[in-house]
Image (tube, rainbow, N blue to C red):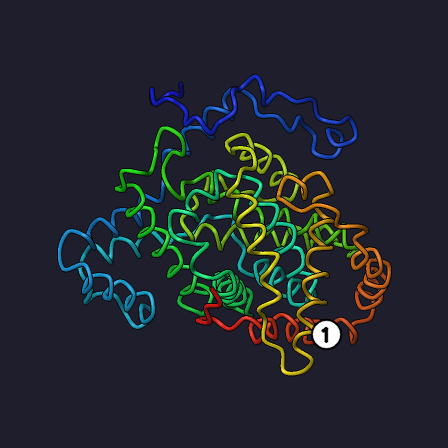
């Protein structure tokens, strides 16, 4: 029971089971135990009952009357808000007023540094986000309930991945997070969709609040945000990519700002990779073990490369991409976790093992040569943008 006298959703582990010893070497690095104390535990449980108050108020207003027109007004305000909001209804103005004062510690110059670093990662960023963060996330079946109840499996994995990739690319364009620039607007559009989904699922009789808490709650959003930051940085290192402390800080800073715009409360934003690692571990205690939904979603994701569009040698390139991504997930998650996701007898993850040393050498060289560094950022961004050509938004392969 938490301080609001609401019982903890049954997906949460008992406090006693969260008190796992932290390895000595890891405790030295992060300066504390990974396990939450009693206060941290209760705060995480409380946050399972909170969505996004500012957006939820706006969505409630949308559904009060003439919902189609009101939704269109909100979307128009997101698209053209830089031209002024004074003519919009008060409810819309009140929502945008909550965005006028970002957390004081946010430094937009550091945000831009994070974006520049991400450009230089090229396709490596995609491997980590897709094959570690997304595939690994399916093991946390607490996340999967929202996906299943909104028809994620029937919509087509290609389309979902492409839409997420489009948002990620929008957020990582140069100056994209300035007010009403591409990433800023794209993030608010996704936030509106989340609010609509939260409203819809919360009012469905088959959504069990006693098990799952509020749909797309603060903690589930936090765990997702950390997948783009802390998890990505850890995965990059496992691929052999060296990361300087300033680069780590810039990436964490960038995604902290993005996810504040997405509706994550400031108290859950972290400034460093180690803080992110601790908080990520605290979110895990709210997640259920892998179940059949984990296997369904993992299978759909693994098959996605077999439906990509390539201009030449399409069948061969599909098979190669399938093996590469499955090998990457195997390398990141390990054999036991892949078995939990329904994959048996994967053999040796040849692709990451064959490419890690060349990748480490490549990124180490470009880092110390200014001319090569600039070229790598341009080439890397081209690789990231090219991904959408293989999984175009709007194509449903289901």
Q: Is residue 334 above or below residue 62?
A: above
Q: Nearer the viewer, residue 41 or 181?
A: 41
Left or right of 190, for residue 383: right
- Quadrant of the drawing holding the N terminus: top left
Residue at horizontal 24 percent and vertical 58 percent from the top: 93
> Residue 217, position in %: x, y?
40, 40
Residue reaching furthest to the left:
65
Secondary structure of the residue carrying tag 1 is helix
Residue at horizontal 37 percent and vertical 33 percent from the top: 49
Q: Nearer the viewer, residue 189 or 256?
A: 189
Marks counted in the figure total 1
> Residue 329, position in %: x, y?
69, 51
Q: Is residue 14 above or below residue 171?
A: above
Q: Residues within 10 Å of mark 1 (few under 14, many from 20)?
A: some
> Residue 281, position in %: x, y?
60, 34
Left or right of 323, for residue 307: left
> Residue 23, position in %: x, y?
75, 27
Residue at horizontal 25 percent and vertical 52 percent from the top: 58
Residue beneath label 1, please?
Answer: 374
Left or right of 214, for residue 107: right
Residue at horizontal 58 percent and vertical 52 percent from the top: 299
Q: Is residue 394 above or below residue 289?
A: below
Instruction: Determine which quarter of the picture holds residue 127.
Output: bottom right
């Amino acid at each position: 029971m938490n301080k609001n006298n609401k019982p903890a959703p049954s997906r949460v582990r008992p406090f006693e089971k969260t008190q796992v010893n932290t390895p000595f070497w890891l405790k030295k690095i992060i300066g504390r135990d990974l396990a939450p104390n009693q206060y941290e535990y209760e705060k995480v449980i409380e946050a399972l009952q909170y969505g996004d108050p500012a957006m939820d108020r706006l969505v409630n207003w949308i559904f009060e009357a003439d919902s189609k027109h009101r939704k269109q007004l909100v979307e128009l305000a997101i698209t053209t808000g830089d031209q002024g909001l004074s003519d919009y209804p008060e409810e819309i103005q009140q929502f945008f007023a909550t965005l006028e004062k970002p957390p004081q510690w946010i430094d937009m110059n550091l945000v831009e540094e994070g974006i520049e670093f991400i450009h230089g990662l090229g396709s490596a960023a995609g491997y980590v986000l897709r094959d570690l963060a997304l595939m690994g996330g399916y093991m946390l079946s607490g996340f999967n309930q929202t996906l299943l109840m909104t028809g994620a499996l029937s919509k087509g994995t290609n389309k979902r991945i492409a839409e997420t990739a489009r948002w990620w690319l929008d957020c990582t364009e140069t100056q994209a997070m300035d007010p009403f620039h591409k990433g800023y607007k794209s993030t608010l559009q996704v936030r509106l969709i989340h609010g609509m989904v939260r409203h819809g699922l919360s009012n469905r009789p088959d959504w069990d609040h006693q098990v799952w808490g509020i749909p797309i709650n603060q903690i589930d959003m936090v765990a997702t945000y950390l997948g783009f930051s802390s998890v990505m940085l850890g995965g990059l290192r496992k691929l052999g990519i060296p990361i300087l402390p300033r680069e780590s800080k810039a990436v964490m800073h960038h995604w902290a700002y993005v996810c504040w715009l997405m509706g994550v409360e400031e108290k859950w934003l972290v400034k460093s990779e180690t803080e992110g690692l601790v908080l990520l571990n605290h979110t895990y205690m709210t997640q259920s073990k892998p179940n059949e939904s984990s296997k369904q979603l993992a299978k759909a994701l693994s098959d996605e490369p077999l439906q990509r569009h390539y201009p030449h040698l399409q069948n061969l390139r599909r098979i190669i991409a399938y093996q590469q991504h499955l090998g990457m997930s195997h390398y990141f998650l390990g054999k036991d976790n892949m078995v939990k996701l329904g994959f048996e007898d994967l053999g040796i993850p040849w692709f990451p093992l064959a490419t890690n040393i060349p990748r480490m050498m490549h990124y180490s060289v470009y880092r110390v040569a200014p001319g090569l560094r600039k070229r790598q950022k341009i080439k890397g961004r081209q690789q990231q943008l090219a991904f959408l050509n293989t999984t175009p938004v709007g194509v449903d392969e289901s």
